[in-house]
Image (cartoon, rainbow, N blue to C red):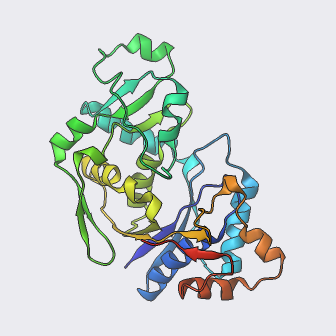
Amino acid sequence: MLTSRFAPSPTGQLHLGHAYSAALAHRAAREAGGNFLLRIEDLDRTRSRPEFVSGIEDDLRWLGLDWDAVPLVQSRRERVYAVAIERLRARGLVYPCFCTRSDIAAALNAPHGPAKPRYPGTCRNLPDDPGLRAATPHSWRLNAAKAIECTGLPGWTEIDGTHFTATADEIDDEILARKDAPASYHLACVVDDSASNVDLVVRGMDLRASTPVQRLLQMLLGLSRPRYGHHRLVVHDDGRRLAKRDLAPTLGAMREAGIDGRKLAAELLEERLPAGFRLAQA
């Protein structure tokens, strides 16, 4: 039975891009007679808000996108992620990194836009110092080269049957956890997809760059390996991306304006977008 999911972060209100992604994932599940799940990715403790969680659920109901189980909430799963980190640490596949928070902050969130600079390996070969680790805030980084030696380069299949094989350049020494964030997007995503038996991940093309390292983590941890459907992004007519930080028009505002949510979801699935918006070219 096919299982898909929608996994937003409650750091702001949803917009049309979220609605399009959720509608695609919901349709895939329903057409296959499967399950559609909701996951709340609230590991960003400084920006996540309970009112945004309520808004996500209200928006999905308004769109007519029902889910089939109690939503999985990542902030309640710190122990699960710690076990995964310990398994990797026991094999020497992660190392403590003492670089500053500003250096690693971007790596703890889903990537957006152009590829970020590669980690220069500052802490990769430092001798392990339990005393230093106990006294100094640090993160745990994946030793990408060593991990690839264990598994080989990962590959994945898109929903249209296209198969991709990653290159080593696409996999960096990613942050997997740090003191104030028990798991990065990459680690939590693959652990939770496997725990929920998700076998189809529907998400935007902006997250396709996440797939190589996530597939590698699935292989290292013996987790399930879903297919992927990376879809085009909803953008403004002038090509600007929709983003919470740019105050993109929210679904909540559309709901309050009396727009028919179920009709909107149906039109999005037909790729008929409201005036002022379009789908970016693949």
Q: Is residue 116 left or right of residue 267?
A: left
Residue at x 62% of width, y 63% of height: 242
Residue at x 59% of width, y 68% of height: 235
Q: Is residue 19 left or right of residue 197?
A: right
Numbered disc total: 0
Q: Is residue 89 left or right of residue 241?
A: left
Across and down, in percent, residue 124 comes to: 31, 24
**Is 83 situated above or below 255?**
above
Across and down, in percent, residue 223 comes to: 30, 55
| Residue 67 seen in the current view | no
Residue at x 38% of width, y 54% of height: 209
| Residue 156 seen in the current view | yes
Across and down, in percent, residue 249 comes to: 73, 67
Across and down, in percent, residue 26 comes to: 52, 78
**Is 267 situated above or below 91?**
below
**Is 5 situated above or below 154?**
below
